[in-house]
Image: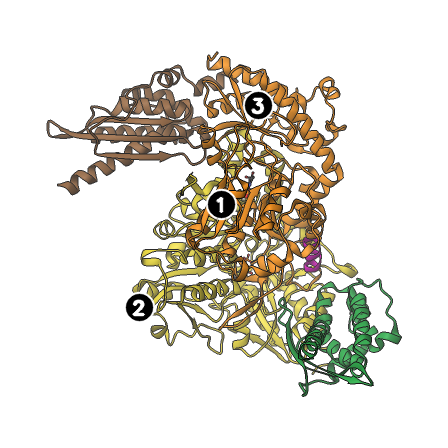
Chain colours: A yellow, B orange, C green, D brown
Amino acid sequence: MTTQTTTTGLLPGLLPELEVIRADFPILERTLAGGLPLVYLDSANTSQKPQCVIDAMVDHLEHHNANVARAMHQLGAESSEAFEAARDRVAAFIKAPSRDEVIFTKNASEALNLVANTLMWATGDLALGKGDEVVITEMEHHSNIVPWQLLTQRTGATLRWFGLTEEGRLDLSNIDDLITERTKVVSLTWVSNMLGTINPVAEIAARAHEVGALVVVDASQAVPQLPVDVVASGADVLVFTGHKVVGPTGIGVLWGKREVLDQLPPFLGGGEMIETVRMERSTYAGIPHKFEAGTPPIVEAVGLGAAVDYLDHVGMDAIHAHEQAITGYALQGLATVPGLRVLGPLDVTGRGGAISFELDGVHPHDIAQVLDSRGVAVRAGHHCARPAHARFGVQSSTRMSSYLYTTPGEIDALVEALAYTRSYFKVG
Amino acid sequence: MTTQTTTTGLLPGLLPELEVIRADFPILERTLAGGLPLVYLDSANTSQKPQCVIDAMVDHLEHHNANVARAMHQLGAESSEAFEAARDRVAAFIKAPSRDEVIFTKNASEALNLVANTLMWATGDLALGKGDEVVITEMEHHSNIVPWQLLTQRTGATLRWFGLTEEGRLDLSNIDDLITERTKVVSLTWVSNMLGTINPVAEIAARAHEVGALVVVDASQAVPQLPVDVVASGADVLVFTGHKVVGPTGIGVLWGKREVLDQLPPFLGGGEMIETVRMERSTYAGIPHKFEAGTPPIVEAVGLGAAVDYLDHVGMDAIHAHEQAITGYALQGLATVPGLRVLGPLDVTGRGGAISFELDGVHPHDIAQVLDSRGVAVRAGHHCARPAHARFGVQSSTRMSSYLYTTPGEIDALVEALAYTRSYFKVG
Amino acid sequence: MTQELDTLYQEIILDHYKNPLYQGLREPFEAEVHHVNPTCGDEVTLRVHLDDVDGVLSVRDVSYDSVGCSISQASASVLADLVIGKPVTEAMAIHAEFLTLMQGKGTVQPDEDVLEDGIAFAGVARFPARVKCALLSWMAWKDATAQSQQGSTHGG
Amino acid sequence: MTQELDTLYQEIILDHYKNPLYQGLREPFEAEVHHVNPTCGDEVTLRVHLDDVDGVLSVRDVSYDSVGCSISQASASVLADLVIGKPVTEAMAIHAEFLTLMQGKGTVQPDEDVLEDGIAFAGVARFPARVKCALLSWMAWKDATAQSQQGSTHGG
Ligand SMILES: Cc1ncc(COP(=O)(O)O)c(C=O)c1O
Ligand SMILES: Cc1ncc(COP(=O)(O)O)c(C=O)c1O
C-alpha cells in the first residue's frame, strides 16, 4: 500500500528513486496495531530521521563525545571540530554569508523568543517603546505570536497584524497602512504550517526595509521544503528548527545579519557567551558564542549537520518538486471527499505541503482517531495557529503533511480512510 | 594501564564491578593518537555515555519518533508516553514531590536563566527592585553569575557575594550580614565545579527562608555524584544538566516547588506553553508545560530517562563512595608531585571529585597539552569560574575530574604524566 | 481495527454526542468556569447551581456550552445527567470514580450502579490522547463546584 | 608522542617563552587594547606606537603585558620582534602571512624570509585548540594598529 508504482509513474515531479529514499528511513518499515503499515502524514509536525543522521549521532556518542570549545584534549578537539563543522554545513545550506551568523538554539521557538527578548533590552535604533509598532500576521504559529505579545505588552509598543484573504493568503491590500514609519519589527512566517501558504517574504521585507524595520522570518516550514538563500529572502533574522529538516529535536537555528546580532544585547548568560566575568561586571563574546550560553546541543548539531547534508544530497529543488507533486495529488484526492473543505489555497503554486481541512459532521479529533485506526497518522487540533483558525471561524482542523518520503499511495490511503470515517460516523 | 586490579583491591569504596561498568561505556575502548588508551579525567566538563543511553535514543529515533502532546496517532502516543515517562523517572531520581514540578530545559544554564529572567517580570512577593538583594557566592559557575548580574543591573537590585576561605570553602562568618530582610534570592552551587567543595545548602537555605528569600540551588555537579533529595536540600528551585549525568546534551532540568513555579510569569512563548492564544492576549498552561515552549528535547529526554535509570541501577550511594575513594586516592597522588598546589579542600570529606591545581612554572594549557600527548584528558582554563580563580590569585588552572568509570590506574597515569610534564618543561 | 474503534466509540457515547442532555447555559448559577484543552483547543463554559435540598447541599443544575470532539461532548452530557439532583458529596464521589476509571489505562472495572452511562467511557481510558477529552467538562465541574462552595461559605 | 609534542613546542618557542622580547608596557603609544581568549582566560594588554620614518608610516614600538601559556607568550614576543621597525604596510603583510600559516591546519609551508622565528609556529597550526593562543597578541596588534591609524587620521 505504501507505494503504487503505476500512480508514481504518472506524477511529474516525484522523486525518481522514492523507494531508495524510503529505505533510508527505518521508521517507515514499522507496522502499527493490527499489523497495519505506517502512513506518516504528520511531517509538518516533525519529520522522520534517515539512518545516516542516527548513525552520525551514535558515532559521535560512542567515539568522540566531549564538551566543546573548552577542552584541550583530543576528544575535545574532535567534538569541537564536529560541532563547528555542523555550523559550517548549516551556513552553507542556507547560504549564510558568514558561519558566525549561524547560532544554535534549542528550537525555532527559542530562536524567535531570543530576538523578541533581546529587543526588550536593545538600545539605539533597535530600542522599542510606546508609539512603536511590531507587525505580524494572522497565520503565525504561536511561537511567532506570544513572544511579540510579551514584548509589546512590556515595552508599551503596539502589535499589529496582517489579515488573511478567504483563500488563505496574506491580505497585502493595507500594507502601507500596516508598515509605516512607526514599524520597528515585521515578523512573519515564510510558509504557513496550517494553511500551507507560501508568503512573498522578499517583497514584504523590501517594504519593511524602506521604513527601517527589522525583518524576522520564521522559516520553520520553509527550510524543510524550499531551497533557501537567507540573503535573497530579505530577512534580517531567519529561524528554523532541526527536527523538521530530518534532524533531531533539541536544536534550532537562528541566522542573523552580523550588524543586527552585534547590536542585540546578550540573551542567556553563562558558559561560552562571556569574554570576561568580573564580580562587578561581565563582558561578552562575539557571535556566534554570545548567544550560546551553556553547553550547546553538541550531538544534536552533529545530527543536524548530517541532516542538511542528506537533504543537500537529494537536492532541495528535487524535494520541492516532490512536495508540489504530492500536494497537488492530495488536493485532487481530498476534493473527491464529500463535505470536505480545505482551509488554505487550493492551488498548488505558492503553497507548501501542509493541508488543513474540515469534514462536515465529524470533529477533527474523531477524524484523526479513525484515520489512526487505519494506520494513517495526521494531526488534529489548532496546530499552534489559533488566530488563523479563528479567522476561518473554526476551532480546530485536521492536517495532513507530506515530505520527501511520501508516496501517492499514502495519499490514496488517506482519501480512502476519510471515506471510511464518513461512513463510520454515518455522515452524508 | 586503565585498571590495576591490585590497587583497586586496596581502595575501600571503589565500585566492586568497575570493569563491568567500564564495559558499558563504548568510548572507553577508544585509543588516541599513537595508539594510546584514553584516560578520561574530564567528567565534570561532560560525562561519557553508557550503551543503554545511546540504544534508548536510537530505538526512539528508529521506531517511535513523533512530536509529543499534540499528536493523536499511535507514534505520537508512544513518543509522548516515552517523553512523559522520562519526566517521571527524573522526578523519582531527585525525589520530587510532583512530576509536574520537573521542567525540561536545554541545559543547566538555561534553567538558571529561566529563573533570573522570569523574576524580572514577577509581581507580588517575588518582585525585585532597588534596595532588594540577590546573594550568590564567589565559587559560582558563570551560568549562576551572569544571569544575576543582568537581573540586578536591570532591576536596580544589588548583587552580593559569599566569599571563600583559603581552603576553598564558603566563608559563612558573615552570613547574617549577607542574608538579611533585603535578601530576595540566594543562589548557590551545591558542589563547586572548580574547587570540588560541597556546600551546606540545607543550612544556608534554612537561613534564607527565615528572611523569606527564594533559594536556588545549582546542582549541576551534585546530581551526578550525590544521592539528591530536592526537598531535603532546602531548595525552592534546583537545576542540573543532562550531559553530566551520563545523559545527552540538549537537555537540562529545572525542579521547583509548585507554589514558586505557579507564581513566576512565563519564560519563552509559543508551542505547548499556552492555554489560549487570542490576538488581544494569551493565557498560559500550567506547569510543567508553561515553561516548555516549542518542541521539547524529546529524544534527549528519552536518553536522560535511561541515564538516571542507569545511575539508579548502579546506586547513587555506591557512586558517591566510588568518587570519594578515587578523589582521596587522587589527592594523595597529586601531593607527591613537587610544585603542585591544589586549589580547594585537601580533605576528601565534604568534597566532590573535581580537583583543580597549579604546577609551578608550567601554564595549565601546557600541562593539559603534555598530558594529552600521554592520553590523559583534563581541562585547563578558568572552568567558567573566573571569580573563584581571581579569589585565589590565579588566572587559570588544570582540573582533573573523575566519575563512576574512573580507575585508580587512571589516577596513576595522571600523576606519572605530571611528572613527565615537569621534566618536559624542565622545571624543578 | 474497527473493533478497536468500537471500544472507543460506544453507541452510548455517540448517542450522547448526537443528542446531548442539559446543553446550553442557564440561570441561576453560583459559579461559571471556562476550561480549555490547550493541546487541541476544545473548550467548555460550565455553570453550577447548588442548593439546599432537605438540609443537604445538592447539585440543582449543571449547564454548559462547549466545542469539541464526540468524546468531550458526550462526557459533558453524561456528567450533567449523573450529577444533577445529587447531594454534592455523592456527586463528588461519582467524580472520583470517573477519574479513577479514566486514569486506569483500561485496567479499572467500572461500577454501573455508580457511573450509569459513564461506563461507556471505559474504552476511552485505553486511548491516552483522548482521556483529556473525556475529563474536560468533569474538571470544569469540579472547579465550578469548589468555587460555588467557597462563594457560599464566604457569602455565608 | 614526545615527537608530536616537539612539533608544537619548538625550541624557538620555548626560548621566547622563557626570555620574551619587548615585554612590558611603554610610552609613547597611540592605542592600547586589551584582548582576552574567553575559553581559557589568557589576556594581553598591548600598545602600539606608529611614527613617520622617511615619509613612511612605521611601527616604532609594540609593548605588551600578558598572562598565558607558552604559545601565547612566545607569539607576542615573536610578533614584537618581527614588526618593530617595519613600515605598517609591510607589518600588515607579515600579519597576513602568519594568519594564513595558523589557519592552514598544518598544510601551509611558512616562508622563513618573511616570518623568521615565526616559522616555529608551523607546528601549532596542527593543534586547533592552540591556534587561538598563538593568534591572541597578533589580533590585538592588528586591532591596536587600526585604532592608531584611525586616531591619527581623525586627529588630522
Ligand atoms: C556548577 C555548574 N553549573 C552550571 C553548569 C552549566 O551547565 P551547562 O553547560 O550544561 O548549562 C556547569 C557545567 O558546565 C557546572 O559545572
Ligand atoms: C511555522 C512554525 N513556526 C515555529 C514552529 C516551532 O518550532 P519548534 O516547536 O521546533 O520550536 C513550528 C513548528 O511547530 C512551525 O511550524
Identify residue type, mark 2. Glu
Horizontally, residue A38 falls left or right of residue C56, namely: left
Q: Please name the residue that numbered disc 1 is placed on.
A: A293
Quarter-of-image position of residue B355: top right
Identify residue type, mark 1. Ala
Q: Please name the residue that numbered disc 2 is placed on.
A: A181
Is A20 contained in the magenta span? Answer: no
- Mark 1 and mark 2: Cα distance apart in space: 35 Å
Closer-to-camera residue (B161/D36): B161
Q: Does any atom of ligand 2 lie closer than 8 Å to the CB of label 2? A: no
Q: Give residue A185's position: percent from left, percent from top.
A: 38, 63
Quarter-of-image position of residue B316: top right
Horizontally, residue D89 falls left or right of residue B260, namely: left
Q: Does any atom of ligand 1 lie closer than 8 Å to the CB of label 1? A: yes
Q: What stretch is highlighted in magenta?
A: B75-84
Give the residue displayed 15% in from the left and 41% down from the top. D155
B377 w.r.t. C68: above or below: above
Ligand 1 placement by image quarter: top right
Which numbered mark, 3 or 1, is in the foreground of this view?
1
Q: Give residue A107's position: percent from left, percent from top.
A: 53, 54
